[in-house]
């Protein structure tokens, strides 16, 4: 998929807050959401967070191991009734460390606390170094809404931050995306620092210099949905946030 636009924000060159203990150049990257089906005709904010509500943070550790039969979208617990997916819901993001390779998947469907279907494609958890022992994972909880603090991403710890948005399927006439930033705290007003409009399958990247603002977030809204969200009539939108210390 080609990158249609590259939107750069030249913010004031103020000094960002120092981050002690983080080596320069270290990258933090998390999936905000995967294959999201958008229905809202007003701006909504969607993201995956840990239990502290942080987007760029460590996910919830799930030590119970899970596996697949070969390469598959069906992921099950290695030990029966351990309920590795007891706290996982549809839309949540899963992060696996497969022998040193960080791999993201999301929950497409949840059959039980011991079995889920992942997307957007298959994963192989049964043939790696761990063999039949399977792998543990971290998960991030999907949340959405239009509140003043919804999906605020702490950006002032980084030298630069990007948010990439990809629309891989859409039926609506168009989709609007905008990035808003503010000083930390709900007493500060959100300022629109970049926007884009999608009229078909496409992608864009927002580049932010976090020197002026402390928090940013991605808003989305749909323009004239067809009202049928089943299979091929569902929008599929994925967004990734990446910060460099």
Image: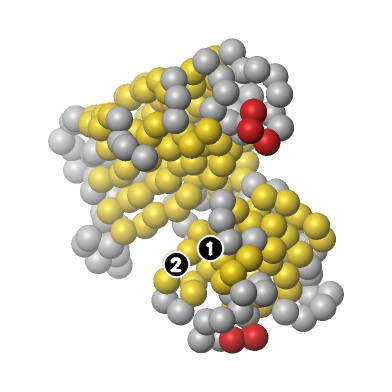
Residue 238 is left or right of residue 29, and the answer is right
- Measured along the vertical axis of the image, is residue 2 above or below residue 20? above
Q: CA distance from mark 2 to mark 1?
A: 7 Å
Among the 4 quarters of the image, the one containing residue 150:
top right
* Image mark for residue 102: 2
Q: Position of residue 15 (x, y in %)?
A: 19, 43
Residue at horizontal 32 percent and vertical 37 percent from the top: 2
Residue at horizontal 42 percent and vertical 76 percent from the top: 100
Neighbor class of circle 2 (other Cα within 10 Å; few <14, some 14-19, many 20+) is few
Which quadrant, please, contains the N terminus? top left
Earlier in the chain: of badge 2 and badge 1, it is 1
Q: Position of residue 124 (x, y in %)?
A: 57, 71
Residue 125 is left or right of residue 84, and the answer is left
- Measured along the vertical axis of the image, is residue 173 above or below residue 113? above
* Image mark for residue 181: none
Among the 4 quarters of the image, the one containing residue 166:
top left
For mark 1, what is the residue? 95
- Asked if marks 2 and 1 touch (Cβ < 8 Å), the reply is yes
Front residue of this view, candidates 209 and 138: 138
Residue 201 is left or right of residue 49, and the answer is left
Q: Position of residue 20 (x, y in %)?
A: 29, 63
State whether residue 93 appears in this view.
Answer: no
Residue at horizontal 73 percent and vertical 74 percent from the top: 77
Q: Secondary structure at mark 2?
A: strand
- Measured along the vertical axis of the image, is residue 161 above or below residue 216? below
Among the 4 quarters of the image, the one containing residue 198:
top left
Farthest left residue in view: 13
Q: Secondary structure at mark 1?
A: strand
């Amino acid at each position: 998929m080609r990158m249609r636009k590259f939107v750069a924000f030249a913010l004031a060159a103020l000094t960002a807050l120092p981050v002690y203990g983080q080596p320069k150049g270290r990258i933090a990257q998390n999936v905000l959401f995967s294959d999201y089906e958008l229905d809202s005709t007003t701006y909504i904010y969607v993201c995956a967070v840990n239990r502290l509500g942080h987007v760029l943070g460590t996910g919830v550790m799930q030590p119970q191991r899970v596996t697949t039969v070969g390469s598959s979208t069906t992921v099950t617990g290695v030990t029966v009734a351990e309920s590795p997916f007891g706290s996982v819901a549809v839309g949540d993001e899963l992060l696996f460390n497969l022998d040193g390779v960080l791999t993201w998947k999301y929950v497409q469907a949840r059959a039980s606390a011991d079995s889920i279907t992942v997307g957007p494609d298959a994963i192989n958890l049964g043939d790696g170094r761990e063999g039949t022992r399977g792998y543990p994972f971290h998960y991030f909880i999907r949340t959405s809404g239009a509140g003043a603090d919804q999906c605020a991403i702490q950006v002032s710890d980084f030298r630069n931050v990007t948010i990439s948005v990809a629309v891989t399927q859409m039926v609506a006439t168009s989709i609007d995306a905008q990035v808003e930033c503010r000083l930390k705290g709900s007493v500060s007003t959100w300022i629109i620092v970049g926007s884009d409009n999608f009229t078909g399958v496409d992608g864009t990247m927002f580049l932010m210099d976090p020197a002026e603002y402390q928090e940013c977030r991605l808003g989305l809204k749909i323009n004239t949905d067809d009202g049928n969200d089943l299979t091929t009539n569902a929008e599929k939108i994925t967004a990734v946030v990446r910060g460099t210390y």
